[in-house]
Amino acid sequence: MRRLFISFEGGEGAGKSTQMQMLYSFLAARGFDVVSVRDPGTTNVSEKIRNILKDKATGDISARVEALLYFAARAQMVDEIVRPALDEGKVVITDRFAHSTYVYQGYAGGMDVGNLAQINDFATKGFLPNLTFYLQISPENGLKRKAAQQDLDRIEAKGLEYHKQISAGYDKIAADDESGRIITIDATLPAEEIHNKIVSHIEKILI
Ligand code: TMP
């Protein structure tokens, strides 16, 4: 079977976690050995970095430093978990990956996306998901969903204008994609319907 590394992307409140769980159960029931990860996070070091990034007590950090922390967390996750799992023939699904950096630190944070892609290449040794599901939601809707679930963390609390830039950034990446690896799905559809769409795309590459 070919290597299968799938990422989920989207703004806050897009429902990535629900879809990750549904896909995990679907693939496991089909007999695949599935590894589920989240970026930033999953390894010991990456979870510590995640805490720094998410904690309101961290205060302001420069966009450059923030980006480097995300890359460091990702590098460790790829080296320690993702690459070995794929080498063993497992399927890996990740909650966020490089596109998040291009959108949050690039389009919304003002950093040059080309530069970010170069550093990402260094951090991951050119490692890319072979399929990305972008769950598309308006920033108003997404933030409303998040705020209803929990207190907003350092990033979620950045305000509507920032989250509008994130939405626009994802839309741009999806529109510019020529690889056919980014699939945009309307995140306001019922969870089951979204899941069925995701599965239909995965089945195409599993054949
Ligand atoms: P989440 O996994 O709960 O969505 O939290 C991760 C947060 O980190 C989310 O607000 C998006 C942000 N993020 C970046 O800003 N850059 C990145 O490269 C990644 C992976 C996440």
Image (cartoon, helix red, strand yellow):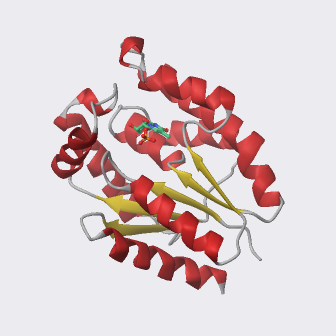
Residue 205 seen by the camera: yes
Q: Quadrant of the C terminus?
A: bottom right
Q: Nearer the viewer, residue 157 or 99?
A: 157
Exactly how many numbered labels are in the figure?
Answer: 0
121 up-or-down from 21: above or below? above
Residue 125 seen by the camera: no
- Report x, y in % for residue 21: 50, 60
Q: Quadrant of the N terminus?
A: bottom right
24 up-or-down from 31: above or below? above
Q: Determine the residue positioned at 68% across, 40% down.
A: 77
- Report x, y in % for residue 56: 36, 18
Position of 174 with respect to 148 (left or right) is: right
Q: Nearer the viewer, residue 50 or 67?
A: 50
38 up-or-down from 188: above or below? above
- Report x, y in % for residue 3: 73, 68
Position of 126 with respect to 69 (left or right) is: right
Position of 53 with respect to 152 (left or right) is: right
- Report x, y in % for residue 147: 22, 39
Q: Determine the residue positioned at 28% across, 71% down.
A: 190
Q: Determine the residue positioned at 41% across, 34% down.
A: 105
Q: Quarter for ligand 1? A: top left
| Image quadrant in which you'd find residue 195 | bottom left
47 up-or-down from 26: above or below? above
